[in-house]
C-alpha cells in the first residue's frame, strides 16, 4: 500500500458520445501503482458504488443522479476495468482488489460510508466491510454472490476453464456482449450499449475480465478459496448494519438460489425482488430500484411513494408481517398444533393435527410450486379456498412470495361475487373444485389469469392441483418482500356494494399486536374461528386454529353439537364467530344442559350483539367471558367490551332520548371521534365539527390498524378518509355517541337513518324499543317511498305470525302502543310483517333494510 497520499486529477472525458449518457467529470488517483478512475458527485453522507465484471462505474450512472442530491456518491472502476488503467502484465485476485479498495478509501479519508455492490462488487465490498465493520452505515446488494459459488450456472463454470474462458472473455468480445444482451430483460439503446463496451475494445483491455472469471473459487484448491471462507466466517460482524437486497429475478446467472444464499447471510435484510429484472437490474427497473435505494439509505421505507400513496403499488419492500410472525412461531414452538381438522363420521370424530414445523414444510413446497407456475411478487391472487390446512398453507405461500392474496366472502351472493372478481382482474386464481367450475363458466372474468390452481389433491378439471405443488422440495426459501398491499379483503356487501379493503403491512402488524396484547391470544392454545379470516392472524400469533365442519357460504347450517364436542375434546380456549352462530350454539347448550368450562373468551363480531345472546353465551362458559368487539373490515378492531363490562356501564341516553348499544372504549392505539353528520366528502379534519358528549353523530376512527383505502376505488377512498396532518381518520359509516367517560354507544348505520321534518330516526335505538315485544323476533326501520316517511317491518316469532286480519290489526295495535311509550317512536304509524328478513349469509344478522323498504313500499296497508 502506498505510504504517501497520491494526487487527484479531474478531467472531462473526450468521447462526446459517452459523455452524453455518462455526463460526469472523471477523477483519477494512483492506487497500487496504477491510475484508478472514479466518479465523485454530490455532498453529504458517503455512498460507495462498486461495480462487477465486465461492467464499470457506467452501470451506476442513473443511480448517481438519484443519490447525489442527498449524498456524496463515489463510484470507482476497479483496476483493469472501466476507465482505470488496464495493465497487461499485472493480474489481481480478490484479496488484491480488497486491498486496492481499502487503500482507495483511506486515501480519500473516508471514515463512514455505505456500500452499494453489484456482481463481483459484492464480495470485494463485503471483504472491506468485514475488516471495517464500525465504518459501515448501510449495505445494498444487487445480484451478486458472496460465499457460495457452487450454485453458479454451467455457463459461468464453463467460462472459468482456461481455454474456453480466455476465448470468451479476453480473446473475443463474447462475454461483454452476452452481458449487455442477456443481462437485461429489455433491449439496450445503442448509446448505452456503446458506453458498456467502450473500455473493452481490444484483447489487451479485456485482461482483467478474464482474471475476474478465473478467480472464482469453485473448490478448496483455488487460491481465493480461503478468502471466501474468511468472508463467510466474518459476515456476522455486519449483523448490526441495515441491509437491502435488490434482485432481478430473470438473471440467467445469479438466479433465485443465489438470492437465497445472500439473504441467508443477512436474515435482517429487506429484500426487493424485481420480477422483470435481469442481471443488470438497475437497467431494467430504474423507476423501482433507484427510489428504493435512495429511501433505504435515507432511512425511509423503501416502498414509500412521493405522491403520498402508501398502498396498491408494485414496489416491493420488507417481509410480509404475517409470514414473518409465523416463522418466529415455527422457531419457538415447532411441535405445537397450528391447525386441527375434525373429521366426523356419524357421531364419531377423528382429528387431523398439523404442527408448525410440518405446516412450514408444506408452505415451502407450495411456494416453490407456485413460483414454478409463474407466481411473482405483486401478483393479485384470488383465493376461493375452503377453510382448513390448504387455505392457510396456500395463503401463507402466496404471502411469502410477495404476492397479494385477495379474499372474498363466499356469502356475498353470486352477482356481488362476479362483480368483485371482475374488479380484481386477478393474475392468479386458486380455488376449490366448485370455484373452478365458476372459472370455466365465466372465462371472461379470468382472462388475465396466468395460471389457475385447484385447491385439491385431485381434480377432474384440466390444470394443476395440489399434487403438483407437493412434488417440490420442502427446503426453506428466503421470503420475498411484500408490496405495500399485504392483502385485500372484500367487505360482505351487507350494507352496500362489496369493496376491496387494502391491508398494508403496517396495518397487519398493528392488528397482530392488538390480538396478542389486547385480546390476549396466547401462543400454544386453540381457537375455533367461525369467521375463517381470523385464522390468518391466529397462525401468526401462535394460536392453533380448529376448523369445524361448517359451510362458509351457509354458516347457519352448522350443527351445534359438533362445535361443542370439538371444544370439549380439544380443550379449546377461544372462539371468533358471529352472534347468530354463537346464539345458535348457546341455545343448543342450554337445551342439552352442556357447558364449556375450557373456553376463556368468545368474541362475537360482524354484527350487533343482542344483550340476551351475550348473556346466554356467558352462561355456558362458566370460566370465561363473552366479548363484543366493534369494528369493520376497514378498521378491526375499534373497541372491545366484555359482557360484564357492558353490564357495569351506566345507562346513558343521547341528548335526543335515543339509547344506543354499548360497544365499549377504544382499544390501545385507536382513537374515536364523533363528528357532525355530513354526507359529502371531508378532505381535512379542520372541515369537521366534533359534537359533545351524548350527542349522536358520525363515528370516525384513527389508528395503525385502520386501512388507508379501497382497492381501485379512489372516489370511495376519498369519501371515507379525512386527512389530519400525517395521519388520517376513517369514516366508519356508523352513527353513535360517546358518553362523558369515553364509552361508545352504537346507533346503527348512517345509511339506515330515516330523515323527517320532525326528527331523525336511527335504526338501533328505534328497533330496540320494538324488539322487547315477546312476539317479535326482530324489527327493521325502513324508509317508504313517495315521501311516506319511516316504517317498522317486523319479523314475528314463527308461532306468532298473524294468520288473519284480526290478528294482524291486534298485533299492530300492540306495536303502536309500545311506540307511544317513547318520544322517539310515538309518531310511527306504518307497520308491516315479513316472515323472513333478507339478511347476509355470513352472519344472518345484517338486515338488508333497503330491500325491505322497497318491499314495504309496495304493500297495501
Image (cartoon, rainbow, N blue to C red):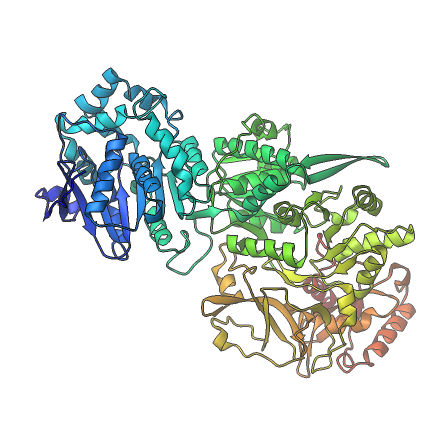
The answer to whether one can see residue 284 in this image is no
Q: Position of residue 311 (x, y in %)?
A: 47, 55
- State the image quarter where residue 854 is shown: bottom right
- Residue 739, above or below 23: below
Q: 320 left or right of 586?
A: left
The furthest residue to the top? 163
| In the foreground, 486 or 538 | 538
The answer to whether one can see residue 380 in this image is yes
Q: 618 left or right of 425?
A: right
- State the image quarter where residue 126 is shown: top left
Numbered marks: total: 0
- Residue 252, above or below 107: above
Q: Position of residue 90 (x, y in %)?
A: 16, 27
The quadrant of the picture occupied by the N terminus is top left
| In the foreground, 289 or 157 | 157
| In the foreground, 775 or 358 | 358
- Residue at image coords 19%, 46%: 107
Q: Where is residue 403 in the image (x, y as percent from the top left)?
A: 50, 43
The furthest residue to the front? 3
- Residue 190, above or below 604: above
Q: 237 left or right of 568?
A: left
The quadrant of the picture occupied by the C terminus is bottom right
Q: Position of residue 628 (x, y in %)?
A: 72, 61
- Residue at image coords 27%, 32%: 95
| In the foreground, 147 or 816 | 147
Amino acid at each position: 500500500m502506498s505510504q504517501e497520499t497520491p494526487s487527484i486529477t479531474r478531467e472531462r472525458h473526450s468521447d462526446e458520445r459517452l459523455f452524453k449518457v455518462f455526463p460526469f467529470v472523471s477523477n483519477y488517483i494512483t492506487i497500487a501503482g496504477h491510475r484508478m478512475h472514479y466518479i465523485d458527485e454530490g455532498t453529504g453522507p458517503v455512498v460507495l458504488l462498486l461495480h462487477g465484471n465486465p461492467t464499470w462505474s457506467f452501470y451506476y450512472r442513473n443511480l448517481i443522479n438519484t443519490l447525489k442530491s442527498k449524498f456524496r456518491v463515489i463510484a470507482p472502476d476497479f483496476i483493469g476495468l472501466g476507465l482505470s488503467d488496464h495493465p497487461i502484465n499485472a493480474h489481481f485476485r480478490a484479496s488484491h482488489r480488497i486491498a486496492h479498495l481499502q487503500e482507495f478509501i483511506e486515501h480519500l479519508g473516508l471514515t463512514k460510508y455505505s456500500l452499494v455492490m453489484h456482481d463481483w462488487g459484492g464480495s470485494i465490498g463485503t471483504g472491506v466491510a468485514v475488516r471495517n465493520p464500525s465504518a459501515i452505515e448501510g449495505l445494498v446488494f444487487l445480484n451478486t454472490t458472496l460465499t457460495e459459488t457452487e450454485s453458479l450456472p454451467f455457463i459461468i463454470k464453463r467460462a472459468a476453464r482456461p481455454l474456453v474462458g480466455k476465448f470468451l472473455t479476453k480473446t473475443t468480445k463474447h462475454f461483454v456482449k452476452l452481458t449487455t444482451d442477456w443481462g437485461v430483460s429489455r433491449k439496450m439503446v445503442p448509446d448505452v450499449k456503446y458506453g458498456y463496451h467502450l473500455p473493452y475494445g481490444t484483447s489487451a483491455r479485456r485482461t482483467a475480465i478474464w482474471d475476474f472469471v478465473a478467480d472464482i473459487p469453485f473448490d478448496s484448491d483455488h487460491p481465493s478459496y480461503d478468502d471466501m471462507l474468511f468472508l463467510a466466517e466474518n459476515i456476522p460482524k455486519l449483523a448490526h448494519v441495515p441491509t437491502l437486497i435488490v434482485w432481478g429475478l430473470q438473471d440467467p446467472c445469479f438466479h433465485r438460489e443465489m438470492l437465497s444464499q445472500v439473504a441467508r447471510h443477512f436474515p435482517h435484510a429487506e429484500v426487493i425482488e424485481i420480477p422483470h429484472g435481469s442481471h443488470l437490474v438497475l437497467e431494467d427497473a430504474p423507476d423501482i430500484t433507484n427510489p428504493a435505494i435512495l429511501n433505504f439509505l435515507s432511512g425511509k421505507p423503501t416502498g414509500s411513494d412521493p405522491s403520498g400513496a402508501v398502498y396498491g403499488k408494485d414496489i416491493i419492500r420488507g417481509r410480509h408481517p404475517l409470514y414473518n410472525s409465523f416463522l418466529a412461531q415455527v422457531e419457538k414452538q415447532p411441535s405445537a398444533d397450528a391447525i386441527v381438522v375434525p373429521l366426523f363420521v356419524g357421531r364419531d370424530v377423528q382429528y387431523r393435527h398439523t404442527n408448525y414445523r410440518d405446516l412450514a414444510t408444506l408452505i415451502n413446497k407450495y411456494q416453490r410450486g407456485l413460483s414454478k407456475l409463474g407466481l411473482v411478487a405483486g401478483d393479485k391472487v384470488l383465493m376461493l379456498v375452503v377453510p382448513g390446512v390448504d387455505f392457510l398453507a396456500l395463503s401463507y405461500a402466496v404471502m411469502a412470495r410477495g404476492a397479494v392474496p385477495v379474499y372474498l366472502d363466499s356469502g356475498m351472493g353470486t352477482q356481488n361475487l362476479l362483480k368483485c372478481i371482475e374488479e380484481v382482474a386477478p393474475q392468479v386464481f386458486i380455488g376449490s373444485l366448485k370455484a373452478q367450475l365458476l372459472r370455466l363458466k365465466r372465462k371472461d372474468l379470468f382472462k388475465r389469469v396466468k395460471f389457475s390452481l385447484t385447491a385439491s389433491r385431485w381434480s377432474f378439471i384440466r390444470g394443476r392441483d395440489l399434487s403438483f405443488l407437493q412434488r417440490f422440495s420442502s427446503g426453506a426459501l428466503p421470503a420475498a418482500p411484500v408490496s405495500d398491499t399485504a392483502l385485500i379483503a372484500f367487505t360482505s356487501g351487507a350494507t352496500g356494494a362489496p369493496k376491496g379493503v387494502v391491508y398494508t403491512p403496517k396495518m397487519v402488524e398493528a392488528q397482530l399486536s392488538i390480538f396478542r396484547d389486547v385480546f390476549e391470544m396466547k401462543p400454544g392454545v386453540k381457537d375455533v374461528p367461525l369467521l375463517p379470516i381470523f385464522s390468518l392472524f391466529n397462525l401468526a400469533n401462535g394460536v392453533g386454529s380448529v376448523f369445524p365442519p361448517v359451510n362458509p357460504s351457509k354458516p347457519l347450517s352448522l350443527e351445534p353439537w359438533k362445535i361443542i364436542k370439538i371444544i370439549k375434546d380439544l380443550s379449546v380456549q377461544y372462539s371468533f364467530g358471529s352472534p347468530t352462530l354463537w346464539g345458535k350454539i348457546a341455545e343448543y347448550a342450554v337445551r342439552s344442559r352442556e357447558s364449556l368450562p375450557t373456553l376463556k373468551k368468545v368474541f362475537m363480531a360482524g354484527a350487533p350483539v343482542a344483550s340476551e345472546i351475550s348473556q346466554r353465551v356467558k352462561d355456558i362458559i362458566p370460566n370465561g367471558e363473552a366479548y363484543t368487539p366493534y369494528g369493520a373490515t376497514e378498521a378491526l378492531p375499534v373497541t372491545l367490551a366484555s359482557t360484564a363490562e357492558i353490564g357495569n356501564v351506566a345507562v346513558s341516553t343521547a341528548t335526543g332520548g335515543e339509547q344506543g348499544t354499548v360497544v365499549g372504549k377504544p382499544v390501545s392505539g385507536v382513537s374515536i371521534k364523533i363528528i357532525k353528520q355530513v354526507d359529502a366528502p371531508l378532505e381535512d379534519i379542520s372541515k369537521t365539527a366534533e359534537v359533545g358528549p351524548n350527542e349522536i353523530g358520525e363515528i370516525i376512527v384513527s389508528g395503525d390498524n385502520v386501512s388507508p383505502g379501497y382497492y381501485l376505488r379512489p372516489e370511495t377512498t376519498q369519501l371515507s378518509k379525512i386527512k389530519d396532518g400525517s395521519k388520517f381518520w376513517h369514516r366508519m359509516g356508523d352513527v353513535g355517541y360517546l358518553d362523558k367517560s369515553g364509552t361508545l354507544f352504537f346507533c346503527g348505520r348512517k345509511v339506515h337513518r330515516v330523515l323527517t321534518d320532525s326528527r331523525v330516526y336511527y335504526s338501533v335505538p328505534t328497533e330496540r324499543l320494538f324488539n322487547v315485544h315477546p312476539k317479535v323476533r326482530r324489527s327493521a326501520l325502513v324508509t317508504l317511498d313517495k315521501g311516506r316517511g319511516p316504517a317498522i317491518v317486523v319479523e314475528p316469532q314463527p308461532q306468532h305470525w298473524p294468520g288473519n286480519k284480526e290478528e294482524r290489526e291486534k298485533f299492530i295495535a300492540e306495536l303502536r302502543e309500545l311506540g307511544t311509550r317513547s318520544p322517539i317512536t310515538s309518531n310511527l304509524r306504518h307497520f308491516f310483517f315479513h316472515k323472513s328478513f333478507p339478511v347476509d349469509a355470513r352472519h344472518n344478522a345484517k338486515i338488508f333494510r333497503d330491500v325491505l323498504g322497497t318491499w314495504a313500499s309496495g304493500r297495501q296497508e
